[in-house]
């Protein structure tokens, strides 16, 4: 079964800063990583193979040329094939245009059984691309998946709820979004890294390769309009109380009473 895993290269968010003048992300010098839940998605695909399913695991990312590193890491983990969707025509895509571009690529590959995405990207944070991609492909979707198996030609998935989980059977092909509860992604082995950089290739596809209508891509194909990006104003500095536990508690209660909060 052909399994397509969509991965996004994201900045390591603990280190992301906004330029206060332009309101844009400062990317220079910020390390990039594979979005963590996308690694969980890769791991699920590898687990299916190790459970005996005959698979071809294809990783796809839409991004700039440096996203090659994310794809090489996925190859090193054990993916069979890697595709980088990279073209000026894709620049400025919102989630809708991103899902359309990924959808075109998945259709171009054809003959797929599963499409796996991470639940959510840690930078954009919308969790929209997986569901939008399923809508584009017109296939069933199961979100928030923490366990999956293939049973009688269907996918059986456990989907996390606030107070437990639900089990869903879906016909194939289907799209699943995977959470970090699913597994602990493996580290690539030295042989995998060697093969990813020396023996395997990353295919680069542009708008032409996927027969895209450029009007539906990038900024032109993005219905979202961003008016302004800004970092929230810092709140006032905190106040540290001192003294014994009793004194600090009394002082805190007085302050809260003074503000009519208790
Ligand atoms: C008007 C507008 C313009 C924008 N312009 C740019 C821009 O120029 N450059 C830029 O980097 N961002 C741009 N963005 C942000 C970009 O739209 C989002 O980062 C992107 O659509 C993914 O959304 P998300 O991060 O919320 O992912 P989520 O929806 O949270 O991601 C869920 C899952 O979808 C998959 N996925 C998400 N994105 C990709 C991808 N690119 N490739 C493969 N799989 C993916 C992954 O499996 C991921 O775990 C723009 C956004 C808007 C609204």
Image: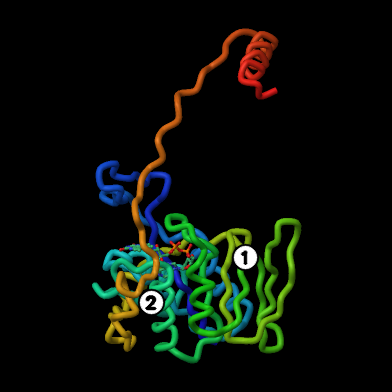
- Considering depth in this image, is 80 or 85 the residue closer to the camera? 85
- Considering depth in this image, is 109 or 262 the residue closer to the camera? 262
Residue 191 shows in this picture: no
Q: Please, is residue 235 above or below residue 80 in the view?
A: above
Query: Which mark, by number, is residue 2?
Result: none
Q: Residue at x 33, y 45 (%)?
A: 18
- Image coordinates of residue 54 in percent, x first then y, are 56, 86
Mark 2 = which residue? 82
The nearer-to-camera label among 2 and 1 is 1
- Image coordinates of residue 39 in percent, x first then y, are 50, 64
What element does badge 2 sit on? strand
Q: Please, is residue 181 above or below residue 91 in the view?
A: above
Mark 1 = which residue? 144
Which quadrant does ligand 1 occupy? bottom left
Q: Please, is residue 60 above or below residue 252 in the view?
A: below
What element does badge 1 sit on? strand
């Amino acid at each position: 079964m052909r399994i397509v895993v969509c991965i996004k290269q994201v900045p390591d968010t603990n280190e992301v800063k906004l330029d206060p003048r332009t309101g844009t992300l400062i990317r220079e010098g910020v390390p990039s990583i594979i979005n963590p839940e996308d690694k969980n998605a890769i791991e699920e695909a590898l687990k299916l193979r190790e459970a005996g399913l005959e698979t071809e695991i294809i990783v796809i990312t839409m991004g700039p040329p440096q996203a090659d590193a994310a794809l090489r890491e996925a190859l090193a983990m054990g993916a069979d094939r890697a595709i980088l969707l990279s073209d000026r025509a894709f620049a400025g895509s919102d989630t809708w245009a991103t899902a359309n571009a990924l959808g075109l690529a998945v259709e171009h590959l054809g003959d797929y059984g599963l499409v796996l995405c991470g639940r959510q990207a840690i930078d954009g944070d919308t969790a929209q691309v997986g569901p939008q991609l399923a809508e584009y492909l017109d296939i069933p979707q199961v979100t928030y998946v923490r366990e999956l198996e293939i049973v009688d030609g269907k996918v059986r998935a456990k989907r996390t709820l606030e107070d437990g989980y639900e089990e869903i059977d879906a016909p194939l092909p289907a799209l699943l979004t995977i959470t970090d509860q699913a597994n602990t992604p493996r580290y690539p082995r030295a042989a995998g890294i060697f093969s990813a950089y020396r023996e395997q290739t990353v295919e680069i596809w542009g708008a032409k390769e996927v027969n895209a209508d450029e009007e539906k891509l990038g900024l032109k194909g993005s219905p979202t309009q961003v008016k302004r990006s800004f970092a929230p104003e810092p709140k006032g500095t905190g106040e540290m109380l001192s003294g014994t536990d009793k004194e600090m508690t009394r002082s805190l209660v007085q302050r809260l009473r003074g503000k009519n909060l208790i």
